[in-house]
Image (cartoon, rainbow, N blue to C red):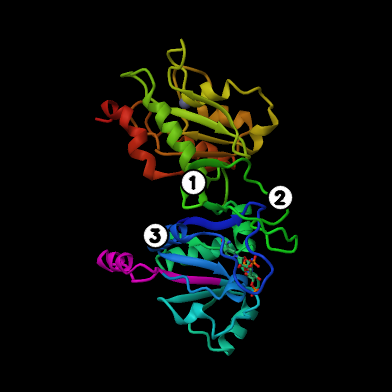
Amino acid sequence: MPHPYVLLSAAVSLDGYLDDTGPDRLLLSGPADFDRVDEVRASVDAILVGAGTIRADNPRLLVNSAERRAARVAAGKPEYPLKVTVSGSGDLDPAANFWHTGGEKIVYTTEKGAARARAVGLAADVVPLGAELDWPRLLEHLYDVRGVRRLMVEGGGQIHTQLLRQGLADELQLVLAPLFVGDPDAPRLFGPGPYQGGRLRLVETRPVGDVVLMRYEPTAPGGRFPSAADHHWLALACELAAACPPSSTAFSVGAVVVAADGTELARGHSREGDDPVVHAEEAALAKIAPGDPRLAAATVYSSLEPCARRASRPAPCARLILEAGVRRVVTAWREPDTFVAGADGSGVLVAEGVEVVVLPEFEGRAQAPNLHLLG
Ligand SMILES: NC(=O)c1ccc[n+]([C@@H]2O[C@H](COP(=O)([O-])OP(=O)(O)OC[C@H]3O[C@@H](n4cnc5c(N)ncnc54)[C@H](OP(=O)(O)O)[C@@H]3O)[C@@H](O)[C@H]2O)c1
Ligand SMILES: [Zn+2]
């Protein structure tokens, strides 16, 4: 299902608060970081905040730099990104800055909220998503109907918490500001409750004036949409494929098995060690104890679709995956007819209820070590 890349952006105090409890917005970042945020805003198609942030901060959410706006226009984009908010209640002040600055605006809400939002005559497109607000539907709507490919989410805490919990965030840009709020009633960035994500991957740290920017990606597979985690692990499988000993009689494939919390359980590649015929998924699965309870919720990432038939061993990889109890496979490329006519490992897996996700954007990388086999 196509959906936008979702980038969460927030600033927190050293004691983890998003704001204080005073009437004015607490400035956590400094000028250099506001400029960095402006640059990120200029790079996206849409900016989203929750209704709570509109009520508390009355933000404008503009691209402030005239050069950045001109560059957007020169690239054929609207001068300002689309502004998006979500409100279940529809309790939105029609005089707020959000509606009267920048470009187009859209409110995602419930049936009830839509009636209220329309009654006050908001200068925005009001889109009800049913009795409750459904985040995957909202993201699909932004992608399909509004053409949004890159979405920046600027809070507040409730919004960030839901997107991260539901595995819908591709990136978190967190700024740590050198001050304390010290008020337990102040809003926190992330609320209490279960987080499935496991440990995030730190992809960058950068001082920006007196704050520190930290960029993280989730590592846990298996949200509603293919995520940054899926991209990371499949890229690793493609790297492993590129490291296989060359062969003129078999594909070069890499595979990684990843637990639901983002822990790598095992990796393997074709013709690994001193076994001249071992397949990547077979090599990886052989390193995990049979019956390991983490397998049931694990994902197998394989640069090539798992094989359905093979001459070199009794069980093809699709069968080994089923026997291991794995229920999700992500791959870059369907097996061509080079060695086996009509190979359909995905079909074997899907017939047994396994979710098979193909990410064609990785096909080139997965094929690269096999070009001599592709006629
Ligand atoms: N430091 C930073 O980077 C930063 C950034 C942004 C905000 N903030 C701070 O964060 C605070 C606001 O955060 P917040 O958590 O209170 O508000 P929020 O996350 O901005 O918005 C929460 C509101 O969004 C709507 N909403 C959220 N999830 C929904 C769902 N699943 N279905 C329907 N509606 C949903 C609801 O609106 P309705 O009530 O209308 O139904 C809810 O009250 C402020 O103090 C602000 O200063 C800080
Ligand atoms: Zn195989």
Task: Say whether disc 1 or disc 3 marks the residue closer to the N-terminus.
Answer: 3
User: Label 1 CB, ligand 1: below 8 Å?
Assistant: no
Among all residues in the image, which is located at the extreme right?
184
Mark 1, residue position = 228
Task: Say whether disc 2 or disc 1 marks the residue closer to the N-terminus.
Answer: 2
Q: Residue at x 49, y 37 (%)?
A: 233
Q: Quadrant of the image for the C terminus?
A: top left
Mark 2 vs mark 1, CA separation in Å: 20 Å
Callout 1 touching callout 3 (CB < 8 Å): no
- In the image, the segment drawn in magenta is 63-85
Mark 2, residue position = 194
* Label of residue 39 in the image: 3
Between residues 17 and 369, which one lies in front from this camera angle?
17
Between residues 217 and 70, which one lies in front from this camera angle?
70
SS of the residue at dot 1? helix
Callout 2 touching callout 1 (CB < 8 Å): no
Residue 81 belongs to magenta span: yes
Question: Where is 234 relative to 57, above or below?
Answer: above
How far across and how far down the image is residue 185, in percent?
A: 74, 64
Between residues 307 and 364, which one lies in front from this camera angle?
364
Task: Say whether disc 2 or disc 3 marks the residue closer to the N-terminus.
Answer: 3
**Classed neighbour count for the residue bearing mark 3: other residues with Cα under 10 Å, few (<14), some (14–19), many (≥20):** some
The three-letter code of the residue at mark 2 reads Pro
The three-letter code of the residue at mark 3 reads Glu
Residue 349 showing in the rendered view? yes
